[in-house]
Amino acid sequence: MSAALEALIRIEEPWCEEPLAEAVGEVAARYGFSHGAALSLPSTDDVGLATRLIHGNWTPGFARGYEAHGLHKFKIVVGTLRTDPMPFVWDIETLYGSDEPDPSPAARFLLQEGYLAGVLLPVHAMTSFNGALSFAGQKPNLSRQAIAELHRFAFVYFSMLAAVRFEENQRNNPLSGRERDCLKLAMLGKTSSEIGLILSLSEYTVSQYLTAAQRKMNAANRTHAVAMAAQLGYLS
C-alpha cells in the first residue's frame, strides 16, 4: 500500500473534514511538496470557471495572493482540469514561458512562494461535485508511480469528503417533507399536474412547494433545484 493511502486509512470513523485536510498536508510533505490543497472544480454550466479552495496546508496569505493574482481561474489550468481526467504535471516555465525577461505579477508571486512545479489530480464524480488535489513545491522529481499513487489518493480522498458532506447535508436538510416529495417526483420527470395527482394536491400547491424549495436552495429554476437537492443528499 502506498504512503499516500495509508494517511487516509488511519482516519477513524466517523469521518470529518479536519483529518482529511491534515492528510493532504501530510501527503504533500511525504512526496516532497511544500504546498498541498483540495480544490473544487467548476461544473460545466458555471460562468466564472474558477476553482475554489476547500482546504489544505496553504497559509491564509498564500490563499489570498493566489486568488488576488487570478490563479484560481487561470484558463490553462482550469480548462485542462475540466476536460481531462488525467493528472496534469506542470512547471512555471511551461505555464508562463521561460523566455520572458520580466515575469508577470502572478509568476513573480509563485516564484517568491516557492510554488515552482507540481501536479494537479482531477476527480470527476458522477454528480456535479468535481474536484482536484493540487501538490506543488520546489520542482519535485515525480516518477510515474508516484503520480499514480497520488491520483489514487485523490479518488479515495474525494470519496471520503463526499461522504462527510453528504451526511452533514442530510442532517441540515432545509426542505420540508412535501418539498422533498415534490422534488423527488420532479426528478422522475413528472409535471406539476402529475405530481398533484400522485400526492393528492392541487397543481397550484405543488408549484408552491417547488418554488419554496427553489428559493431555499437559491436555485435558478426547477431543474436546477432538483439537481442541487439530489447532489446534496436532500432527497435520500
Image (tube, rainbow, N blue to C red):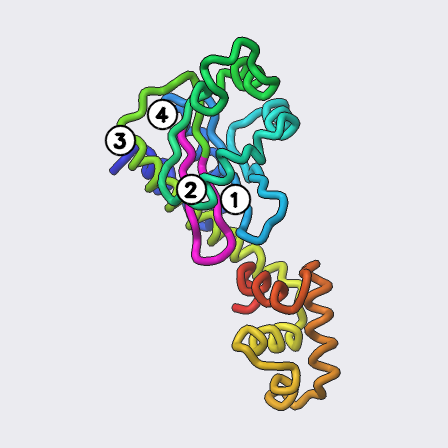
Residues at discs 2 and 4 in contact (Cβ within 8 Å): no
**Mark carried by residue 30:** 4
Badge 2 amino acid: Pro
From this viewpoint, is residue 10 visible? no
Residue 54 screen position, x and y as percent = 55, 39
Quarter of the rendering containing residue 63: top right
Mark 1: few/some/many CA within 10 Å (<14, 14-19, 20+): many
Q: Of helix, strand and loop, which one carries label 2?
A: strand
In terms of sequence position, does the residue under pointer 1 or pointer 2 come before the other?
1
Measure how far apart labels 4 and 1 are at the Cα level. Answer: 25 Å
- Magenta region, main secondary structure: strand
**Mark carried by residue 122:** 2
Residues at discs 4 and 3 in contact (Cβ within 8 Å): no
Q: Of helix, strand and loop, which one carries label 1?
A: strand
Residue 73 screen position, x and y as percent = 58, 35
> At 54% from the left edge and 35% from the top edge, which residue is drawn?
75
Q: In this view, does 149 lie to the left or right of 103?
A: left
From this viewpoint, is residue 232 visible? yes
Residue labelled with disc 3 = 144
Residue labelled with disc 1 = 41
Measure how far apart labels 3 and 2 are at the Cα level. Answer: 16 Å
Q: Quadrant of the N terminus?
A: top left
Badge 3 amino acid: Arg
Camera-near label (4 vs 1) is: 1
In terms of sequence position, does the residue under pointer 4 or pointer 3 come before the other?
4
What segment is highlighted magenta in the picture? 119-133
Mark 2: few/some/many CA within 10 Å (<14, 14-19, 20+): many
